[in-house]
Amino acid sequence: MTPPPERVRVTRTRRNAESDYPRTVREEIVGESGLGATYVSSLMRAQLHLTLGVLAVGVMTLGALPLIFALVPPVRSLSVLGIPVAWPVLGVVVYPVVVLVARWYTRSGERLEAEFEDLVSRR
């Protein structure tokens, strides 16, 4: 005959150490939880909106210049110092504008990431 099982008195239920305190956003992201995925996807969505906005502006402005020169003959025939105006506009004026837009894009992207980092470190 086997001895009867030992009786155990239960005074409270067991709890995981994790559930004793609220998880931080950083832990949510590292743990790949639903909330962490939401935070990361919101950052990615904001970066995508910024990128698509810059691309749209670039396509509308830089893409419109050759189209204007091709479709409007008086603009095509303009010249400065014997050089058609299309060449200085496309070859000289466009580059500083592209550099300024690139600088703005970089700073905006860094600002988005800094805001995200601030949000993560705050909670």
Image (cartoon, helix red, strand yellow):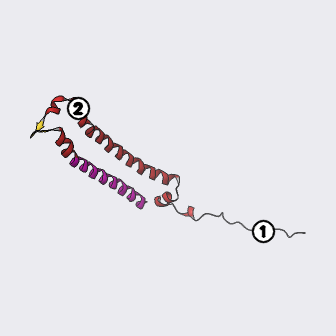
Q: What residue type is disc 1 on?
A: Arg
**Observer-nearest of 112 and 102:** 102
**Which residue is painted at 35% across and 43% down in the image?**
52
The quarter in which the C terminus is drawn is bottom left
Residue depth check, mark 1 versus mark 2: number of the one nearer the observer = 2
Which x, y percent locates residue 2?
A: 87, 69
Give residue 27's mark.
none
Residues in magenta, as a range: 95-123
Q: Which residue is mark 2?
A: 70
Work out whether mark 1 precedes mark 2 in sequence or the reverse, and give the earlier one. 1
**Which residue is painted at 90% across and 69% down in the image?**
1
Where 38 sits versus 6, above or below?
A: above
Q: Secondary structure at mark 2?
A: helix
Q: What residue type is disc 2 on?
A: Ala
Q: Secondary structure at mark 1?
A: loop
Between the residue at mark 1 and the residue at mark 2, the CA separation in whole angstroms equals 93 Å
